[in-house]
Image (cartoon, rainbow, N blue to C red):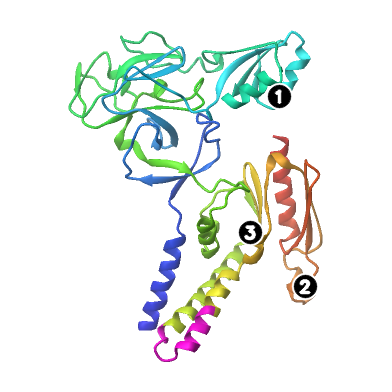
Amino acid sequence: MKFLKSSILFGLLCLSCSKPPGFLIMPDSSMETTITKGTRLSIEPKAQISRNDLIAFYLPAASEITCRRVVGIPGDKIEINKGVIFINNHRFDRPASGKTLYSAYCKDSTRLNLLSAYEHKIYNDHYWMVYVTKDQLQQILNQHLTDSIHELGFDSTYAYREIIRTNTSKGFNHYYFGPIFLPKIGDTLTADNQALINHYMPIASDAYVVSENYFFCIGDKFSDAMDSRVFGLVPKSKILGIVKEYQKPNPANSNLLFKTLRFLSPFWIYCTMPVYRTFSVLQVILVSILKIAFLSVAAYALYHYPENPVVSIIVAAFGILAFLVTGSDEIIVYKDAVEYRSGSILKRFREKRVFKISDIRSVTADGLYDTGFELAKGSNPAFTSFNKVEITLKNGEVYKFQTPIYISKLKKAIAEIGKLIQD
């Protein structure tokens, strides 16, 4: 019984350490390029909310959760004038990573094609609308890609979005809003300002006493973001917590602790949401069983440590090492990257196996190793010729490796990568 308790506690400890925080998938583009659509975000619940925090919350009258930047907190005066945000009469600088809408003009219409690398919409033969960050705008100016370029107040494509109006408002588009005052608990809202919270809580009375705190939130894609200018103030009861980016698929990610926890969890495969992954349910079950068995061996050895310390340490070390090394190869296709995850923990640390979609020119796979192949051949997969994968990057680099991933799954992964490259 004591051994069983030790095994259970040891297993729960490992699993609890590897359990990621709550997360969501960014459902829209209102926070670009700070956070792009499809990015996985973690949530820190019950955190103290401050100005400039990114928060996750429920949209009005919907079950969808999204993320925006907190600009105004209870008691603040908020005004947007000519696209400049003022908080309590002090200028609030929008983040450099946020996108702004510009109108680009070229007398020679063919030159506008030089802007195709940026998010854009074609207005006519000589004018394009482009959404760019401050750094991207500087690139356009430095390279003289246009004859002229200037900031637009809003995109007429989104004119159907009705900006909230109050008696104090000076204008009614994304670049003109307020001034408004964010109420605190106990404040009374007059009929003039009840529009600020009507989307979340329709009010029929002429005066309403505020029963909770409200926050004014802005999307970093300022020119056409769906934010508090459209749906009003966000009540504290609808906020899930503070948000931050979570395991963005990037070769620069060197968080060793996070990677180690990922290796430890046999159930990590159920905690991410990529576009496609080549895992097999049978493989996951078998690997999980093996890992639990190795953990049990380690727990059993540690339980008998007082009886024979030397043997216990050796056996426990073997169990833990086997637990860490056990795994299966996998290719994971994300929205903006591709990761090859080797079954060997040593290769994961030693070799670069994450590639940005924007850097990939082509991916090919060749081989016969597929579902049931080793059974049909009656041979050990370790001595069977595995499938070959070749990834060619736009800079000319070529990465080649062999993998036991089934060829049928490799082809599906390559098809998904092809779609993302075209997009």
Q: Compared with residue 54, is residue 260 higher up or lower down, i.e. above or below?
A: below
Tell me residue 135's x, y (percent): 60, 26
Cα distance between the residues tagged 3 and 2: 21 Å
First in sequence: mark 1 or mark 3?
Answer: 1
Tags 3 and 2 touching, CB below 8 Å: no
Instruction: Give the residues drawn in magenta, as a range.
Output: 303-317
Tags 2 and 1 touching, CB below 8 Å: no
What residue is disc 3 on? 279
* Figure quadrant of residue 406: bottom right
The local crowd at label 1, few if under 14, some if 14 to 19, many if 20 or more residues have their Cα within 10 Å, is few
Query: What number is the disc on residue 332?
Result: none
What residue is disc 2 on? 376
First in sequence: mark 3 or mark 2?
Answer: 3
What residue is disc 1 on? 116
First in sequence: mark 2 or mark 1?
Answer: 1
Residue situated in front as seen by the camera: 105 or 185: 105
Find numbered disc 2 in the image and state the secondary structure of the residue it sits on. Answer: helix
Q: Residue at x 36, y 23 (%)?
A: 232
* Figure quadrant of residue 361: top right
Please count the marks in the image. Answer: 3
* Figure quadrant of residue 165: top left
Cα distance between the residues tagged 1 and 3: 36 Å
Going by the picture, which residue comes out furthest to the front? 142
Q: Is residue 351 visible?
A: yes
Q: Main secondary structure of the magenta part?
A: helix
Three-letter residue code for mark 2: Ala
